[in-house]
Image: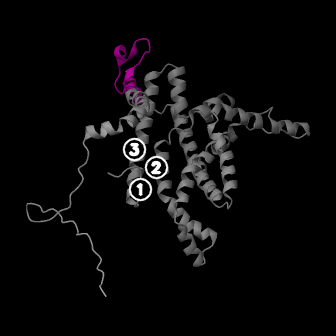
Amino acid sequence: MTATRETRAPAPVPTAEPGGTSKPKRRESQGFWARLRRDHPVLLLALPGIAVVIVFQYVALGGNVIAFQDYQPYLGIGRSLWVGFENFSILFSGDPEFLNALRNTLYITLLQTIFVFPAPIILALLLNSLVSNKVKQAVQSVLYLPHFLSWVIVVAVFQQMLGGAGMINNFLRSHGWDTVDIIGNPDAFYALITSQVIWKDTGWATILFLAVLSQIDRSLYEASAMDGATRWRQIWHVTLPGMKPIIVLLLILKLGDSLSVGFEQLLLQQQAVGRGVSEVLDTYVYNNGVIGGAWGVSAAVGLVKGLVGLVLVLVANKIAHILGEEGVYRA
């Protein structure tokens, strides 16, 4: 019998370096112009968005110079008088209107951090517990809809429901019961605006959390179930740790935007409850700048608000790094 022998192709011989060591060849990276020629269709599609960001986000930053001027619109930035830091004196002089706006802003921020921020996390956990994907998709579609409504429509809907001539009060009046004042009641204003934000944006905010939940390894749940973990134990020890990075990231971004608490929403309802409870820093800038003509003071308040938001993001990001999270960026 003749034995057949399998033939194998010879292994490639690595190229030798001048120093005697062999090193595999690396594919040379393309140069800048080569990548530009390759990706120019995508870059052309992105140009309109880039132009909008540059014009309305970066070029507009130059307008902050009026915070150091006695700005007059008919004179323009070039001919308005420079007053240095005089416009910033309102921040330290104890102006009652400014302090009231700052106090309302901080209080609304606290309420939204406690009640609004966790709402999409809880809703995502509830949706994730649904067994039927069809039911889950149907519920998601309904919950997303309010996000696409403008604040004008949202406020109008709440007025039609809870206003003095709204559906609830008409029902109470038709049965001879006492009506309830919610829309025009300053004591109920903070609960009202918090519920409006939850109704409008919670469904849309669940998208990110549902995406994170879909990436958690299912074998972790199976292993915890074999160890006797209940559903709540699985959420606490598997689900929430898996969601921790995105929760920390969104919380940092929330802190950066913490002094902006819904300009349109509050301005639309300010006449009903008065400026005492509804005046925040954004409406203060509008009422004193655009309406009152104190452009320099309003610009100074807006500039300080932006700087405070930047500092909050940097500090929160540093704390996230100390706790072992990625945060927004890593230096």
Residue depicted at 31% across the width and 36% down the height:
37
Gap between marks 3 and 1, in whole Å?
14 Å
Gap between marks 2 and 1, in whole Å?
9 Å
Q: Secondary structure at mark 2?
A: helix
Gap between marks 2 and 3, in whole Å?
11 Å
N-terminal of the pair, mark 3 or mark 1, is 3
Front one among 184 and 325:
325
Q: Is residue 9 left or right of residue 259?
A: left
**Label 3 neighbourhood size at 10 Å, few (<14), some (14-19), many (20+)?**
few
Q: Is residue 125 above or below residue 65?
A: below
Q: Secondary structure at mark 3?
A: helix
Q: Is residue 118 visible?
A: yes
Q: Which region is colored magenta? A: 62-89
Query: Dot 1 corresponds to which residue?
Result: 320
**Label 1 neighbourhood size at 10 Å, few (<14), some (14-19), many (20+)?**
some
Query: Dot 2 corresponds to which residue?
Result: 252
